Image (cartoon, grey):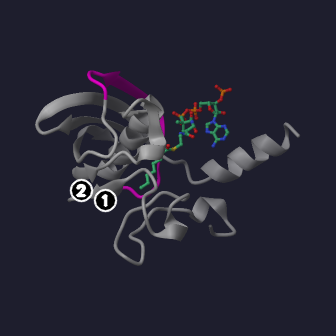
Amino acid sequence: MPDDPDAFAIYPSASGRLLCGGCAAEDRCRLGIAAVDATRFDVVCPAHWQGGPGVAHGGWTAAVFDEVLNLAALSTEPRLVTKSLTVSYLRPVPVERPLLVTAQIDHHAGRDWTVSARMSLAGTPLATAHAELRTRRPDHYARHEAWLASHN
Ligand SMILES: CCCCCCCC(=O)SCCNC(=O)CCNC(=O)[C@H](O)C(C)(C)COP(=O)(O)OP(=O)(O)OC[C@H]1O[C@@H](n2cnc3c(N)ncnc32)[C@H](O)[C@@H]1OP(=O)(O)O
């Protein structure tokens, strides 16, 4: 991470992947997401994200949506945060099976983005999501650190 936290932005890694701050150092997505293009993602739920027998933890599904919904907008805006995320769990999501997630930008004006996505297995929808994203203010992380320091 850079010394100035607000210099943080997501750009392609050495291998060309767009990765979050937690995965960039390993140059791999620990959630199991591989981008096909800007709006389609091949995803496999690793077994350690199992929440029930052979079934993905709902938090994994939400994290995958958070990631791909941001990725859909990242080619236009590398400095985003999620303001809200709503997930509908339609069917259990199996672990270690090839899933397809598609994402799209529904609306963008100024700092405000609305995006949506769908997770499917062999064409059958398993879950859907909607999110509001915001382009970060230039002092987002500095403001966060100042707020945190004031609460120590
Ligand atoms: C490839 C990799 C993809 C990675 C994808 C990962 C994406 C993510 O998950 S990002 C992490 C999750 N999201 C967040 O952490 C966002 C947290 N929320 C926020 O920062 C803000 O609420 C935000 C920016 C969404 C909305 O801000 P905005 O619409 O501009 O509203 P604004 O009125 O300025 O702020 C709302 C409140 O939050 C506070 N706030 C806003 N920004 C900050 C900040 N940076 N630090 C501290 N407080 C803040 C404001 O002071 C205000 O507080 P209050 O209601 O007490 O006055």
Q: Where is residue 89 in the image (x, y as percent from the top left)?
A: 32, 23
Q: Residue at x 38, y 63 (%)?
A: 18
Q: Mark 2 points at which residue?
A: 38
- Amino acid type, label 1: Ser
Task: Give the residue at the far right of this rendering.
Answer: 152
Q: Mark 1 points at which residue?
A: 75
Q: Position of residue 67 (x, y in %)?
A: 40, 47
Q: Position of residue 12 (x, y in %)?
A: 38, 70
Q: Which residue is drawn at 14% across and 31% down?
A: 124
Task: Write down the region rendered in magenta.
Answer: 75-92
Q: What element carries label 1?
A: loop
Q: Find residue 62 and name its label.
A: none
Question: Do residues under tags 2 and 1 come within 8 Å of each other at their CB atoms?
Answer: yes
Q: Is residue 14 above or below residue 148?
A: below
Tell me if 54 is positioned left or right of 27 in this view: left
Q: Is residue 102 magenta?
A: no
Task: Give the residue at the far bottom of this rendering.
Answer: 14
Q: Where is residue 111 in the image (x, y as percent from the top left)?
A: 41, 43
Whichever of callouts 2 and 1 sits on the residue coming sooner in the sequence is: 2
Front-most of 1 and 126?
A: 126
